[in-house]
Amino acid sequence: MPDPSPENRQEVRDLSVRLILLLGAASLLGSLVSNGARSVTGPYLLLLGGSAAVVGLVAGSGELIGYALRSATGAYVGRSHRYWKVAMTGYGLLAAIPLLAVAGRWETAAVLIIAERIGKAVRTPARDTILSHATTTVGRGWGFGVHKALDQVGAVIGPLIMVAALALTGGYAPGFLLLGIPLAGVAVVLFLAQSKVPKPGRLEANGGTRENMDDPPVIIPYAAFIFLGMAGFASFPLISFHLKAQSIVPDAVIPLFYASAMVVSVMVALLVGRVFDRIGTHVLLTIPVLSTATVLLAFSPDPGVAIAGSLAWGAGIGIFETALRASIAESTAADRRGKVYGAVSAVFGTAWFAGSVVMGILYDVSIGHIVAYVVIVETAAVIAYLWMYRCRIAVRLQEEIGGLIP
């Protein structure tokens, strides 16, 4: 256990900051690789002979598998504490992206695309648990906010690299191969981070909070809030479909809407991190507001209003993923976080998948039906948050009373 002297605390803080920045750099490079490929996998599958149905199935299955598996990988990390080994294995599956250059058939490409999503499921609970230890001395919100911001920078740069490769070569293969360069950078950064902090749990000597979010009285209402909040959060593919189907903006402008949303998510992630450190989980209440604002604005026939909706969507991404991970770190004992990160990520992804399917079906009925659905779901999310808040207060009171009894 580290000496609690001021000098030692400053040393731990400095080491924690370096670890957060290194993991942020790894996520930036990894996001550059994955999002660079994901920006063109649809047309690439079509080029290889896949149908539109195949594209939808592969994309949807990859996301669902990528989130659902996190429950299992999170539980393994929680038991084994092999954070670095699991994280490196997950990042290693990014090697599937350069291999897309030689796929040849849509079936092979589909397997590689899903393999990359499985890698995301493997690495995320382990990486977030490492981050939770590193954010102890610097602020949960700030630490996760910085990490999310760096991750989103990669999400912006990756597609731009693929656009440049396509413009210069006219083919997809050179772009996929080019993404192998930042992939090598991921490996270098991860090995450097591991060498700096081989046992990240030591950054949190006291084991974290006594509260445990995986206890049923806490996790059930929390999971209900996450599920309802994400079930009403529109997906950008549906927003972009609307922009094209209604000819609201030219096709070439749609990627700029996405890039603008990602830029907003970077700025919001940094801001909400600081806000979280001041007001805690209450910042999550902005999600129902932003989810409702997104559908009211993004599905407008007016281009100016539609881009405002896209920016609201980007702000929601920055808030949800920053505050969500920080709240778990704040409310779960260190030795149980891997399990909770995995379980909550599975709920998060399943809800987003289910909500996207429902909104996609309702779009063919009317946009008004989507708005009504989101208003109902997000109202229920607010109720679930109040339920969660009351349960957490009750649990803390029980712990305090138990601590007073000899």
Image: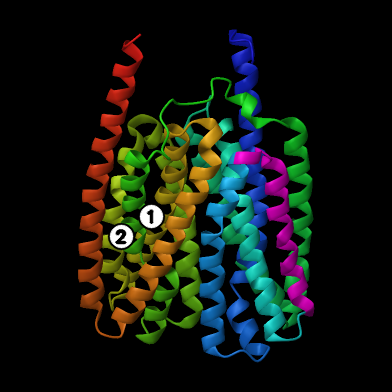
Label 2 sits on residue = 291
- In the rendered image, the quadrant that contains the C terminus is top left
Relative to residue 274, is residue 359 depicted above or below? below
- Give the class, few, some or many, for how many residues have Cα within 10 Å of label 2's Cα (few <14, many ≥20): many
Give the residue displayed 45% in from the left and 36% down from the top: 141
Any part of residue 23 in sight: yes
Contact (CB < 8 A) between labels 2 and 1? yes
Q: Secondary structure at mark 1?
A: helix
Residue 301 spot, x, y in % from top left: 28, 79
Give the residue displayed 68% in from the left and 48% down from the top: 87
Give the residue displayed 64% in from the left and 24% down from the top: 202
Any part of residue 152 in sight: no
Residue 88: in magenta span: yes
Residue 322 spot, x, y in % from top left: 45, 45
Q: Which residues are magenta?
A: 79-102
The front one of 126 and 220 is 220
Label 1 sits on residue = 316
Q: Is residue 169 left or right of residue 28?
A: right
Q: Secondary structure at mark 2?
A: helix
Residue 42: in magenta span: no
The front one of 305 and 310 is 310
